[in-house]
Image: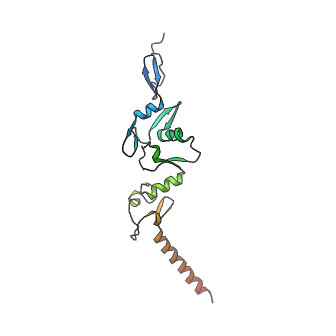
């Protein structure tokens, strides 16, 4: 005769379950998400670490992705659920959007929260080394690096002028 309680699982209690009167009782996903969410004036914050994970239908899911799928259907291959509010533990559907990896990286560089490329210290600077502001109209992002369009255009002009001078000398 086993001494284990009814409903015992080898790995212990599953995250989506709680001990009920007659063993483990399944807790609905909506109740689990509500219990771990703090609603602020701007965002709905997951109180776990980082993006937050929940067990649902015997699989681990990221909460923001799961909520997107509940609201909008399956996420197409190659697309990510991105945050417009730049708060990675926000699960507010109004702050989530679908985009490619490249669009998400572009968004992070333009908003100055990129860690790669030219580095965080430089992406937080409001202007280029020549003093031109990094505005959406004056910024080009290439390989996760911000480039000042005013400086790029000046560089292109210098290069074209130099080429024109070399070609002019070569012609008789």
The residue located at (49%, 70%) in the rendering is 152
For the point 56% across and 48% down, which residue is it?
A: 79
In percent of the image, x 46 and y 46: which residue is there?
94
Could you say where residue 129 lies in the image, as x and y percent from the top left? 40, 68
Q: Residue 39: x and y, percent?
A: 38, 40
The residue lying furthest to the left in this view is 41
Q: Answer with left or right where residue 10 lies relative to residue 168.
A: left
Give the vertical position of 105 relative to 13 (above or below): below
Quadrant including the C terminus: bottom right
From the top left corner, tell me how far across and down residue 84 is, in percent.
45, 50
* Frontmost residue, 98 versus 19: 98
Q: How many marks?
A: 0
Farthest residue to the top: give it: 1
Q: In the drawing, does residue 39 fall left or right of residue 162?
A: left
Q: Is residue 113 above or below residue 14?
A: below
Along the line of sight, the residue nearer the viewer: 91 or 23: 91
Kindly give the residue lying farthest to the bottom in the view shown.
172
Residue placed at 50% from the left, 52% from the top? 104
Q: Specify how the rendered protein is coloured.
A: rainbow
Viewer-proximal residue, 129 or 56? 56
Q: Residue furthest right?
A: 172
**Residue 12, horizontal then vertical, whole percent:** 45, 24
The front one of 91 and 122 is 91
């Amino acid at each position: 005769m086993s001494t284990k309680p009814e409903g015992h699982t080898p790995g212990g209690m599953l995250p989506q379950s709680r001990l009920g009167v007659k063993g483990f009782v399944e807790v609905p996903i909506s109740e689990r998400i509500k219990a771990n969410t703090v609603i602020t004036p701007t965002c709905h914050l997951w109180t776990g670490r980082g993006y937050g994970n929940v067990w649902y239908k015997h699989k681990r899911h990221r909460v923001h992705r799961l909520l997107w799928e509940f609201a909008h259907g399956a996420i197409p291959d190659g697309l990510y659920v991105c945050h417009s509010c730049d708060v990675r533990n926000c699960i507010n559907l109004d702050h989530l959007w679908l985009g490619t990896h490249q669009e998400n990286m572009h968004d992070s560089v333009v908003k100055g929260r990129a860690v790669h490329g030219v580095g965080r210290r430089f992406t937080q600077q409001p202007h280029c080394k020549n003093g031109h502001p990094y505005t959406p109209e004056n910024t080009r992002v290439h390989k996760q690096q911000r480039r000042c369009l005013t400086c790029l255009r000046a560089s292109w002009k210098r290069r074209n002028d130099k080429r024109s001078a070399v070609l002019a000398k070569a012609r008789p």
